[in-house]
Image (cartoon, rainbow, N blue to C red):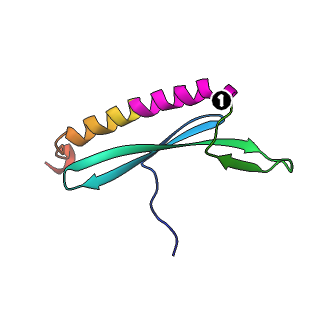
Amino acid sequence: MANTNKPIAKVQLYPATGSIWKNQTSKGAFYSVSFERSYKDDAGKFQTSTTFNAGDLLTLSKVADLCDTKIRELRAADRQPDQPDEEAA
């Protein structure tokens, strides 16, 4: 059986990607982020890794900052009451 759990959003600045995950609990939703780095192997095929080189750290920090901004947007949307559909009236 395939894992159907997918991130709610992704932020990518090559070579770093931040995947944002939403987890629902009895106390409400919370968000977490996983990071990975893309690279080409010797055969030219894209691979991913969860380790970063020193040269990737500034890009990683920018991805982390953008993930923080996106999570703040998602939390704000979570707090918004459902808006009635204007066309349904």
Residue occupying the point 80% across, 47% down: 41
Q: Which residues are magenta?
A: 54-68
Residue occupying the point 16% across, 46% down: 84
* 2 left or right, relative to 31: right
Residue occupying the point 33% across, 33% down: 73
Q: What number of labels is visible?
A: 1
Residue 56 magenta: yes
Residue 60 magenta: yes
View extreme (top): residue: 58
Q: Which is nearer the eye, 74 or 62?
A: 62
Which element is circle 1 on? helix
Q: Which is nearer the eye, 72 or 54?
A: 54
Image coords of residue 20 (percent x, y): 44, 44
View extreme (bottom): residue: 1
Q: Amino acid at mark 1?
A: Asp
Magenta stretch: dominant secondary structure: helix
View extreme (left): residue: 89
**Number of residues whose C-alpha sits closer than 10 Å to that of mark 1, classed few (under 14), some (14–19) or many (20 or more):** some
Query: Residue tagged by mark 1?
Result: 56
Image coords of residue 1 (percent x, y): 51, 76
Image coords of residue 8 (percent x, y): 42, 48
